[in-house]
Image: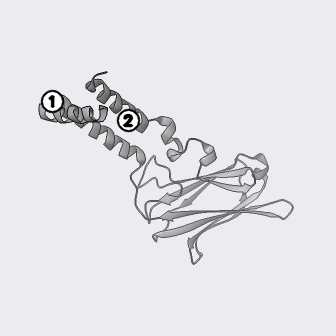
Amino acid sequence: MNKLAIFKNVCLALAGLIFSASAWAHGGAAGTDTDQCKFELEPGHWLHYTAYQPEMYPAKDFCGSLPALNALTQLVFDYQDMRYRDMAVEFEVTREPDGTRVFFEEAKKHKSGTVALSLPKGVTEQGKYLIHITLLKNDGGRLDAHMGFTAGAGESISYSTYGLYALFAFAGLYVLYLSSAGFKRQIDTGLEKIKA
C-alpha cells in the first residue's frame, strides 16, 4: 500500500470516528443506561428531564447545565410508568448551597405523564441549583427525587463541534499534501521513518 493510500485511509477512519452517530447519541452516551437526564423515583423506575431555553437557544435541549441567565426556561418531565400518573407531583427549584427557593409548583396530577414547567425569567444568578420532585402516593407516602444543574456558564462547545474542526483541519492538510511538493516530501519522509 502506498503512502498516499495510507494517509487517505487514516483521514477517512478519523472522520468516521468523529461523526459516528452512535458515539454522539445522547450527548456522547451510547444508550439510555447512561442517560444523565433522569431521576430515579424508586429502584428501576425513572423520570426523564429535559430543559429548554427557546429564546436564546432554539431547537437545543439541556440537562445538567443551562447556559443562559434571565432567560425563559422550560423544564419538561416525562414518566412512563402508569402508576405515577395517578399521583400528585410537586416541583421545586432551589439555589444551592443555601437552599433559596427560585421556583415552586404545588402538587397536582398530570394524567398524560408529561409535565412542562415554565420559568419566565429562568434563574437569575450563576451557580448550582437543585430540582426537587415529590410524588404524593395515594396512601399518604412520598417519593422524593433530586437532580442538580448549573446555570449561567454560557454554552460550551460540544464534542461534535470539535470533531468538525478536526475534519476541516485534516481536509486542509490533505489538500496541502496534494498541492505542495515540500510538504508532501516532509510527510513522505515521516511515513518512511514510521514504517522503518
Q: Position of residue 62 (x, y in %)?
A: 50, 53
Q: Amino acid at mark 2?
A: Leu
Seen as rendered, the residue at the extreme front is: 196
Residue 14 visible (yes or no): yes
Q: Position of residue 91 (x, y in %)?
A: 65, 63
Q: Quadrant of residue 196?
A: top left
| Among the two numbered marks 2 and 1 on one chain, the one whose residue lies closer to the N terminus | 2
Q: Nearer the viewer, residue 132 or 177?
A: 177
Circle 2 residues within 10 Å: few <14, some 14–19, many ≥20: some
Instruction: Tell me if residue 190 comes above or below residue 97 in the rendering.
Output: above
Mark number displayed over residue 32: none
Query: What residue is drawn where x is 77% and y is 56%?
Result: 87
Residue 122 visible (yes or no): no
Marker count (numbered): 2
Instruction: Tell me if residue 183 comes above or below residue 64 in the rendering.
Output: above
Q: Quadrant of residue 164?
A: top left
In the displayed structure image, the side of residue 42 where residue 58 appears, left or right: left
Q: Which residue is mark 2?
A: 14
Q: Nearer the viewer, residue 79 or 193?
A: 193
In the displayed structure image, the side of residue 160 where residue 7 appears, left or right: left
Seen as rendered, the residue at the extreme right is: 139
Label 2 to label 1: alpha-carbon separation: 22 Å
Contact (Cβ within 8 Å) of mark 2 with mark 1:
no
Q: Position of residue 193 (x, y in %)?
A: 26, 35
Q: Position of residue 169 (x, y in %)?
A: 27, 40
Q: Nearer the viewer, residue 103 or 163?
A: 163
Query: What residue is drawn where x is 46% and y is 52%?
Result: 54
Q: Amino acid at mark 1?
A: Ser
Seen as rendered, the residue at the extreme top is: 1
Mark number displayed over residue 179: 1
Give the structural element (helix, strand or loop) at label 1. Answer: helix
